[in-house]
Image (tube, rainbow, N blue to C red):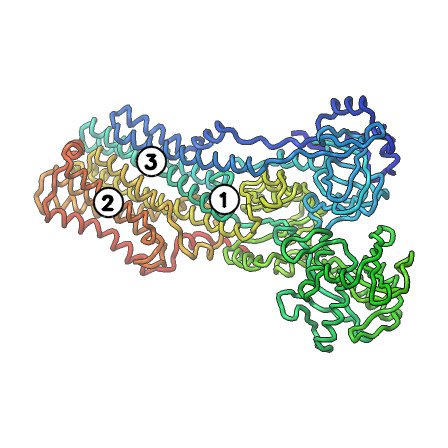
Amino acid sequence: MKKKDTTYPTLDGTSPWKLESTETVKFLESHSDEGLDSSQARSRLQKYGPNRIEAAKQRSIQQILTAQIKNLIVLLLAVAAGVSFILGQFLEGIAILVALIINVFIGFGTELRAARSMEALQQMTRRHAKVLRQSEIRKIDAAKLVPGDIVVLEGGDIVPADLRLIEANRIKADESALTGESVPVDKDVATLAEDTPLAERNNMLFNGTALTQGSGRGVVVATGMSTQLGHISQLAEGAQEEALTPLEKRLNSLGQKLIWITLGIALLIGVTGVLAGKDLVMIFKTSVALAVAAIPEGLPIVATIALARGMWRMAQKNALVNRLSAVETLGSTSIICADKTGTLTENKMTLSTLVLVDSQEVMHVRWDPEQAPPFSVEKDTKTDDSLNNHIKETLIIGMLCSNAHLPKDGEGVGDPMELALLQAGKTLGLQRDDLLEAYPEKKEEAFSPETKMMATWHTWNQDKMVAVKGAPEAVLESSSRLLTIEGQTRKLDKTLYEKLLQANETLADQGLRVLGIARRFTDAVQKDPYSSLTFMGFVGLLDPPRKNIRKVIDNLKQAGVRLVMVTGDHPGTASAIAQKLDLPGDGEAVIHGDILKSTQDYTSEERHNLLKSSVFARISPEQKLNLVALFQADGSVVAMTGDGVNDAPALTKADIGVAMGGRGTQVAREAADIVLKDDNFATIALAMEQGRVIFSNIRKFIVFLLSGNVGAILIVGLAMLFGSILPLLPLQILYLNMISDVFPALALGVGKGEPSVMDRPPRPSSEPVVTRALWMTIFGYGLLIAGTALTGFWISLEKMSLSGERAVTITFLILAFTRTWHVFNMRDAGSGVIVNDVTRNLFVWGAVVLSIVLLIFAVYFPPLSQVLTMVVPTPFQWLFILGMSLVPLVVVQIIKQMAPHKNSDTLLRKRYVQ
């Protein structure tokens, strides 16, 4: 894809924010008082196209179906089924096909339902815009806007395109979805420098953002895919998503190994049989049967069902998963890059600190609504009564000087900082409606970018009182006196003035949004409300961390997962939240986005510092992409969370993208693999745990299945090598393979896992499904199973002097029951012998019972017993069969108890996250 130019093509690459508003209008051949005429609008609509963002293409039914069969093991099984039919082994061929059909059906049905749920979640309503055309204000479909249109806006409107403001009346815009800025941004028409960052372009309004207050007009400089929203949408589309998830890569790698193992088994058994002088037809059938048995036909269906159950469990926890493998991928995640605003924080401002004056000292008062009283100071120099009264007076002024509304129950409406003051007052039993009844408002002087303050006049007893709040420097500059905590009014001298300025800088450095609050008593409503004010104090406001986020982060640390904060917000704000969450890593405290480049452009020292850092601020969408790529190049499995359009490219690039469904934008939801419908970050930890359990279940199933198959192969191979009659017949091998590959394996695949699964570090991205140590375990189990069956075979022939047919029957049943009990050997080392994940799994008990029934059926149902060449054992022979079959179970359990802490998952992973 051609790289998208970040400049506006309608202006020939000129940045509209550096032009005067009149120049921009002239450049676009429009008129600020008349707008475009109809012919201009038609021609430009034809030239630039509709003003809409191209939606991401949804996966078709055919694509979802194809994805279920584009798997190396599935293709290998299809070949195995074909060979079985060619050789007349219809039983095994049908069994493999049934497993494949069930696998495709479950995967297709689950992912189709997820796709349809996502489409329902992403329905958008049509937007309209008020535009000046031929000197008339008209309401038109926003899709028909064109460059040069003059758009009329007021508080509450969604910005329909990228605009250069030409008129601004106390406009504030919520740009959090685009830039990550946590509070509304003041807008004006003043020109800016060419290199002004996106988050600081205060004379621009961007498509998809919202006006929280004010009114104005802007000229359209870009529409559709040429807007900042469109640019980010193209970044998301162009971001190179990993073609295969870690699980898919591991299963494909295992499939490649199994191809060679299968061919090797067929060749080895064939050569051994020829050298031993066996019948060539029997050798061929036995070789094919063992080769087919070596292929785990249950693997795709077990993996699919395990992932589907995880997907359904996540849906119950309000997490919508787009594709099955995403659940397991989250389980192998080693780094989570989380957006700050709304993900780690509440996305609403709250009071954090007050700065008040105590005689000659400036006092910092901490505010915590969860405590009683909700305020505290380091040095308890004042009584709670005097401090409480002064805080109440300060908050009353802030609450009166406001346009926000906070009902007794429900969400408030208005500026986030004003709502924060109303909420703080509510904690002390204050309601704005009650205050307005006691102190009726007579006049309002709205907030002005010039004065940076707002004022309201109120009746206060027999006088008038002016309530003022605004930028701390402006309020302080307009104040001549101050009110102390003791309730005394005194002159604001130079010493206290300097101390208060320093206190303001301290709050700003901590990432707090600071407001100054002051008042003045007068006998009349005057024109100038901002003179001779009495300073009350500063209030420091912060978008606080979510209530349970610390516990979630601690759980992630316990699981060896690093959390990295990535935000477009101010570095000071990011630092303050990071400290509250104990996030700073070994690198610099906060990394500015300008430092991030492509992964090839760093020195080794720069790369090391970035990889160790945990807080990144003022990050653009391109820089988020670079950051994700940097972590991936270091071998990490990266999850990215976010809700804004600025998060979409990184959500696509990451190994697993997690979007917020409640407040998340459509672009973010389309780019994500998982959508949290309740916007609860804690759900990620639950999904991660589910992913780890799924992988553990798949690994247990593979060890169970391959070790049993290795046992069968060794039984036949060793018998041929020593010139004995075959202890197992081809059809017996295939029948046993059908039982073991389906029922116990399925039961292992749906286990709930051990509680300790989140106490282990994540798997390295390079770790295969079956590690070298697990291959050794598989062959060890196989030797034990083969040794037990061959011992039973030898005793039957040599000690009991049984016929070959009866000895083969006994050997088959010993192997069959051994593999049935073998499922209980799949418990984790260190877990209980009696109570563990396997024994708690009711499906395992059901599978064991069903397997026993099918084995009894094979012995006592004449048509089947004749096909399998089986004879009915005597009661003593049944006791011998059951006794021999329990030997591997007892041996393995003793070994696991002797080494309870040597869990294979723990031993194999030495990579711990700092």
Query: Horizontal and vertical percent for residue 905?
Result: 42, 52
State the residue at coordinates (51%, 39%). Answer: 322
Measured in 3D between alpha carbons, the distance from the residue under mark 1 to the one under mark 2, in whole angstroms, is 36 Å
Horizontal placement of 207 versus 219: left or right?
left
The label nearer to you, 2 versus 3, is 3
Q: Is residue 192 visible?
A: no
The three-letter amino acid code for the residue at tag 3 is Ile
The label nearer to you, 1 versus 2, is 1
Residue linked to disc 3: 295
Query: Horizontal and vertical percent for residue 569?
Result: 70, 50
Front position in the image: 725 or 185: 185
Disc 3 packing (10 Å; few <14; some 14–19; many ≥20):
many
Horizontal placement of 526 versus 136: left or right?
right
Count of numbered marks = 3
Q: Is residue 503 visible?
A: yes
User: Which quadrant: the C terminus?
Assistant: bottom right
The three-letter amino acid code for the residue at tag 1 is Thr
